[in-house]
Image: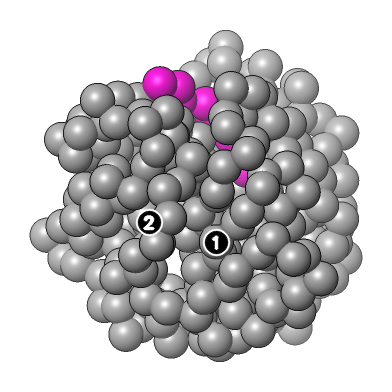
Amino acid sequence: MASLDYGKVQEFWEKAEPSSLSPYMMNGFGFPDSSAKYRFKAELKTMKRLLEKANCNGTVLDLGSGVGLWTSFFAENFSRVIAVESSLSLYQALVARCSSYSNIQIFDEDIRLFEPKTPISLIFSGGLLMYLNENDVRNLLNRLRGNLEPDGIIICRETTVRNGTTIRQGNYQAVYRSVSVYNEIFQATGFQVLKIEKNTPYVLMEMGIQFLENWKKLIPNPVQMISILGPSVYYSLRLLSPLLFGIQKIVKIEYPKLENHFFVLKPI
């Protein structure tokens, strides 16, 4: 099986524009900035529900913090946050966003090698494992297990496929694993999977992205009108989302190709 070229992965994120859309891979499709706010606000509801029993007096380890959307949320709800980001451009945006919080420590380090010096009550990985080859995922999880407090948990939010594993090559590289593959990895590294929840805001936005990707392939660049079509697609999806998900359940259409799930893990 092919593997990720970490040099390519790092190069992509060093060049990525540190905007509110960049962590969600929604740049270049004409979506308004409000689309990122919509998705993050919806994901916050899920996160708050998953954190109901978490130790808010403890420390959060935010791995792959990006521009700091989740980091600032954790800082407002936990005693202390350790944020780690290996992309220099995203690290600088992270510092700019979170420098006013006295309870955040920010590190520009290789996430695969970072070792916290204090017990952790919550580890959050928001789209990190998809940029790691399986051996590195297993090594990371095995190490993180030893960093958790006795009642500590890990929450992963990862882009998924319905079956098996798909590796995306080229300038943008990622590994998309199915829920069953992640389950096997988590259990093999000593974790009990407490909860799995589909990230429906992601799926909704991915419907639009997949449509626009196909549009770009079919229509010549001068007449694509992405600046007009992108917002139209976004607002149509928002309006029609109950109908779209209802139809999807009835006819079981496997669209879009990519989904996204939250996983809550606890050491066995």
N-terminal of the pair, mark 2 or mark 1, is: 1
Please give left or right for residue 146 compared with residue 71 in the image.
left
Q: Residue at 64% of width from left, 19% of height from top?
A: 247
Query: Where are the magenta residues, as a range?
Result: 194-203
**Res. 72 image quadrant:** bottom right
Q: Secondary structure at mark 1?
A: strand
Please give left or right for residue 150 compared with residue 198 in the image.
left
Neighbourhood count class around disc 2 (C-alpha, 10 Å): few under 14, some 14–19, many 20 upward:
many
For mark 1, what is the residue?
A: 82
- How was this image coloured? one colour
Kind of residue sitting beneath label 2: Met
Neighbourhood count class around disc 1 (C-alpha, 10 Å): few under 14, some 14–19, many 20 upward:
many
Residue 57 rendering spot, x and y as whole percentages: 63, 39
Q: Nearer the viewer, residue 257 or 110?
A: 110
Q: CA distance from mark 2 to mark 1?
A: 21 Å
* Camera-nearest label, 2 or 1: 1
* Picture quarter with the N terminus: bottom left
Q: Residue at 24% of width from left, 25% of height from top?
A: 268
Q: Residue at 75% of width from left, 21% of height from top?
A: 243
Please give left or right for residue 199 compared with residue 12 in the image.
right
Q: Nearer the viewer, residue 44 or 58?
A: 58
For mark 2, what is the residue?
A: 130
- Furthest-top residue in this view: 250
Q: Nearer the viewer, residue 143 or 31?
A: 143
Q: Is residue 117 magenta?
A: no
Residue 128 drawn above or below residue 204: below
Q: Secondary structure at mark 2?
A: helix
**Res. 6 image quadrant:** bottom left
